[in-house]
Amino acid sequence: MARPQAHKSKTGRNDPCWCGSGKKYKDCHLPIEQAHRAEQLKLREAQDTLLPKIIAAAQSVPEAFPAAFEQFWQGEYTPDQMGELDDLEERGAERFLVWFAFDYVMESGTTLVEQLAQVADVEGFEVDAYEKRLLESWINIRMRPYQVAEVHKGKGVTLRDLLDGDICEVADYAAAKRLNVDEVVIGHITPADRPFDAEKPIGYFAGAAAQLTADTAAKLVEFAELHLADLRRTQADATWSDLLRRRSYALNHFVMALPREEDDPSLLDKVVFDARVSLQLTADAISGLLGRDAPEASEDAANAPKEDTGEDAANAPEAPEPDATKR
Ligand SMILES: [Zn+2]
């Protein structure tokens, strides 16, 4: 087994192959690498063509939108506002449709992407062999929160999953321009082509993602932990994946609760506090459900957001700012 770096330097066609077989490169790994590259290029192209097909399929089942809107937008918007969503929320319509396709569990008990992967090539949804391969590998993709670990100018970004810590490389020239290290993105990363010497496929942003400032990361994890603790009340061994399968929409509720413009750290505390109240979780219960030691003293009062002494009625709990994405 050759090490990846062994053939980073250009091996000539007639040179001994980098793998150490003793054969010439052109008679050994050159054709294998060429075939791999050609195949991966097809997958890369399929990434571009498949997503619009999935979005179109999502738009063809509007009867499922009311219930899905209720989940994703927390009752804030109704499907007849679909046309305005891009104004009301940064790229809101696209973010909803991608979530709807990948995450929303339909009456059949499956997601749209799962359904499409099963019935590909019927009912007007036609995919080629490469698109079908991708579709099958996208069944488990859900909306997730990531923090930007590195920005590779002109290429893409390295993202760290805020929940399980996994690292993924995302090829996206535009994202590399737009994102800064430590910022948070909540969206769908779909794997596609895999370079010959890479262990994992390269990821791509599937449609729009919400972009949040770096200071939201810790609170977002805290917020997600509340939901995980709540899920563990009924499913003691629930994992992050279980949580995202059932309630990835909660991530969008966090996004919706953030202020559009000004920095207001107390608002972040309030988002977490409100979630804790609505889930009726005490600090002790959270610790227990997450398998941690309970905090020293009762933190319930201390964790409450500072009261704003009522000078700002517009920031009352029932009226969060309508947008979430950083601009
Ligand atoms: Zn070889």
Image (spheres, helix red, strand yellow):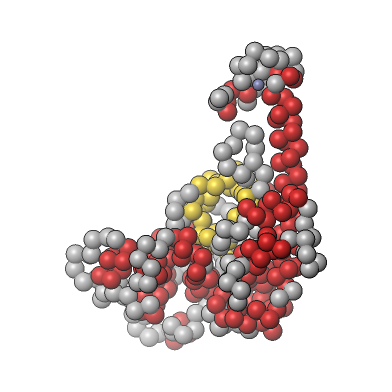
Residue 259 is situated, as x and y percent measured from the top left of the image, at 51, 72
Whether residue 161 is visible: yes
In the image, residue 155 sits, relative to residue 224, either above or below, namely above
Q: Quadrant of residue 152?
A: top right
Q: Residue at x 61, y 74 (%)?
A: 108
Whether residue 23 sits left or right of residue 325 in the image: it is right
Q: Which residue lies furthest to the left in this view?
A: 297
Residue 277 is situated, as x and y percent measured from the top left of the image, at 36, 79
In the image, residue 245 sits, relative to residue 300, either above or below, namely above
Whether residue 205 sits left or right of residue 129 in the image: it is left
Residue 94 is situated, as x and y percent measured from the top left of the image, at 67, 68
Quadrant of the rendering where the N terminus is positioned: top right
Whether residue 99 is visible: no
Q: In which quarter of the image is residue 72?
A: bottom right
In the image, residue 3 sits, relative to residue 102, either above or below, namely above
Q: Residue at x 35, y 72 (%)?
A: 233
In the image, residue 259 sits, relative to residue 205, either above or below, namely below
Q: Quadrant of residue 42?
A: top right
Q: Which of 90 and 288 is in front in this view?
A: 288
Whether residue 327 sits left or right of residue 318 in the image: it is right
For ligand 1, the image quadrant comes to top right
Q: Residue at x 72, y 54 (%)?
A: 132
Residue 166 is situated, as x and y percent measured from the top left of the image, at 48, 49
Q: Which residue is drawn at 46% across and 56% down?
A: 162
Q: Which of 114 and 65 is in front in this view?
A: 114
Tally the marks. Answer: 0
Q: Nearer the viewer, residue 203 or 234?
A: 234
Quadrant of the rendering where the C terminus is positioned: bottom right
